[in-house]
Image (cartoon, rainbow, N blue to C red):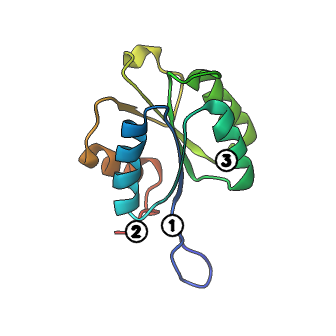
Amino acid sequence: MSNPGGTATAMRVLVVEDSEEQAGLLRKHLERAGCSVTTVGTGEGAIAAYRSESPDLAIIDLVLPGMSGADLVLRVRSDLPSCKIVVTSVLDAFEFPVADAILPKPFTGAQILALLDSALPGMRTP
């Protein structure tokens, strides 16, 4: 994202993933792509995180403790209408709620980069 002064601002990504391994993998690939990443393990944690800093993109696992990922998708849509939403899960894609993109598990670094470019074209720093 560019600001009027011409300096790039890192894409802000919120990762909602209860698996530390999966969250770490997403963080690694997203930070390599120039994103500013916040990771949380619950839907409730996600709400607290996006209240303090609005993300450009939220990557939400569907299977979470407490609030479900599907319920969180609806909440993010309501609270942050400009935030792009990506759903990730091992569930079959037909079970995914409506989102801007999907990232089925297991995923690769190349899939994450393609996802960033399609969800928010021109925002990723090379």
Cα gap from disc 3 to disc 1, whole angstroms: 17 Å
The residue labelled by disc 1 is 10
Q: Quadrant of the C terminus?
A: bottom left
Of mark 3 and mark 2, the one earlier in the sequence is 3
Give 118 or 88, whichever is nearer the viewer.
Answer: 88
Q: Residue at x 40, y 60 (%)?
A: 31
Q: Amino acid at mark 3?
A: Ala
* Residues at marks 2 and 1 touching, judged by CB atoms closer than 8 Å: yes
Q: Does 95 sit left or right of 92 as displayed?
A: right
Name the residue that disc number 3 marks: 49
Numbered mark located on residue 125 in the image: 2
What element does badge 1 sit on? loop
Q: Amino acid at mark 2?
A: Thr
Dot 2 surroundings within 10 Å: few (below 14), some, or many (20 or more)?
few
Q: Of label 2 and label 1, which has the lower sequence position?
A: 1
Front tag of 3 and 2: 3
> On the rendered structure, is 2 left or right of 82?
left
- Quadrant of the image occupied by residue 65: top right
Instruction: Please tell me whether mark 3 sits on a helix, a strand or a loop.
Output: helix
